[in-house]
Amino acid sequence: MFSSLKEKVGQVLVPGDEFGFEAEDSISLTESAKPERVVCGPGLRRSGDRLVVSKSGVLRHKPPHCFWIESQQRRYIPAKGETVIGIVTAKSGDVFKVDVGSSEQASLSYLAFEGATKRNRPNVQVGDLVFAQFIIANKDMEPELVCIDGSGRANGMGVFGAGGLLFKVSLGLVRRLLAPHSDIRADLDRLFPCELVVGLNGRVWVRSSSTQQTLIVANLLQSCDTMTAAQRQQLFRKVQQGAL
Amino acid sequence: MMEVSASSVSLREFGCEQTLLSRPDGSASFVQGDTSVMAGVYGPAEVKVSKEIYDRATLEVLIQPKVGLPGVRERSQEQCVRETCEAALLLSLHPRSSLTLILQVLHDDGSLLGCCLNAACMALMDAGLSMSCLFCGVSCAITADGRIITDPTAAQEKESRALMTFAIDSTERRVIMSSTKGSFSVHELQQCIAVSQKASEKIFHFYRDSVRRRYSKNL
């Protein structure tokens, strides 16, 4: 299975494609047989002794044995540990309801902020943006967010300050932006300084020194989805020379 | 399964475009000859309490005709498409949520239900919903003299003795859904299924090509 998966890395697969588990006809006596382990990420499902692809996209591999399908979807499905940008939609008692773009609103306790106590409530209003992390996220339960890490520190999370612009891009682009040594981010760095908050739910928040520059960054990122690397670099170069 | 030579299966020119709409979570347009359908998928989204199913997602299919309001014909087509999609989608992965599939008929020149099914599959794939397999729709018409025409035009449909549409899955080429009109023998039905299965290979091949083209920018 491992070898057949590895052969297909970087190729486009569609739902229904299968990977069988081929048992070897002869067992070598000299080489010790190592059990194969495969960790399946999004888009791959186990069905009996086969591995079935359930989403269309590119098969990716991370050594030693992680495989997943990289797809360009737009609807977010919460996953534990992911950081997202949410919009506070309601205050009810001791929890805030937060819209994260998934099928259900997530809840955020007022105690889940840095330095918050029963006396000292955080200043969160309806309509505010929060950068938060999922602590509970599964298909059967209401998702729950927190704005602190395990040691009670904000660690970059919390309510957003004034200014800036929020817009939506595809989930694939978000993951490309967040990848270590992301080439889109490197291209953007050369343009002009800006503050970027990227939520895994496809929401991106940008703030730079002027409204015009903020809009340029937003438009550039939104168009990155449908461009190849060469096209993108050409466009960024044009912007750098003051075409926009 | 009957033997069908590939040359006996002729489909009109078909084409597809994915992610052409900005608002829905997934969208596609599918063109077969002059028949053209546009599809948009929303979901998994919030669901009305009255339509909530506790262990799986609620799938809603709406077919909008080119002119006028949807009627009985559209309702029956909606049901065909919905049942096919339910068979292919892994709905239990998103309990208590809703999926909405909207199919807008842009032009009807025969094989409309088949084209709707193809557009629906491409849109569902574009939305990134988990599916156990792909499906495609193939329409066949039996002429008065007993010939089988795959992917008939509206004129051919009108002259035909019987009209059938099959939804076929991609893994084992089995029939998921069938919708028939007119009179035909058992043998003719078997023959039509065999022809449709043959034709489905071409469509699945095309699906794969168009998905590959879509992802070519970030390989």
Image (cartoon, coloured by chain):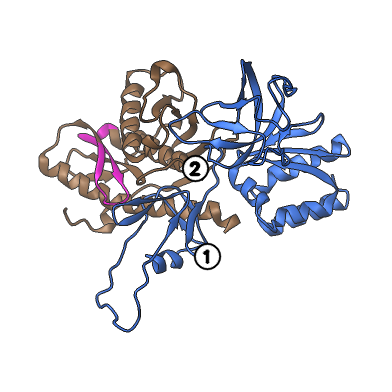
Chain colours: A blue, B brown
Magenta stretch in the rendered image: B158-177
Q: Using the image, determine if residue B32 lies above or below residue B42.
A: below
Image position, residue A239 (x, y; %): 83, 49
Is residue B134 among what the camera can see?
yes
Q: Quadrant of the C terminus of chain B?
A: bottom right
Q: Nearer the viewer, residue B38 or B52?
A: B52
Image position, residue A230 (x, y; %): 70, 59
- Marks 2 and 1 sit apart, C-alpha to C-alpha, by 28 Å
Residue at the spot of label 1: A63
Name the residue located 88 percent from the left edge and 39 percent from the top edge. Answer: A209
Name the residue located 45 percent from the left edge and 36 percent from the top edge. Answer: B36
**Callout 1 crowding tier (Cα within 10 Å): few <14, some 14–19, many ≥20:** few
Tell whether A191 sits left or right of A182.
Answer: right
Name the residue located 85 percent from the left edge and 52 percent from the top edge. Answer: A240
- The image's mark for residue B126 is 2
Q: Secondary structure at mark 1?
A: loop
Tell whether B23 sits left or right of B150.
Answer: right
Name the residue located 40 percent from the left edge and 37 percent from the top edge. Answer: B93
Q: Can you name the residue that lies furthest to the bottom here?
A: A30
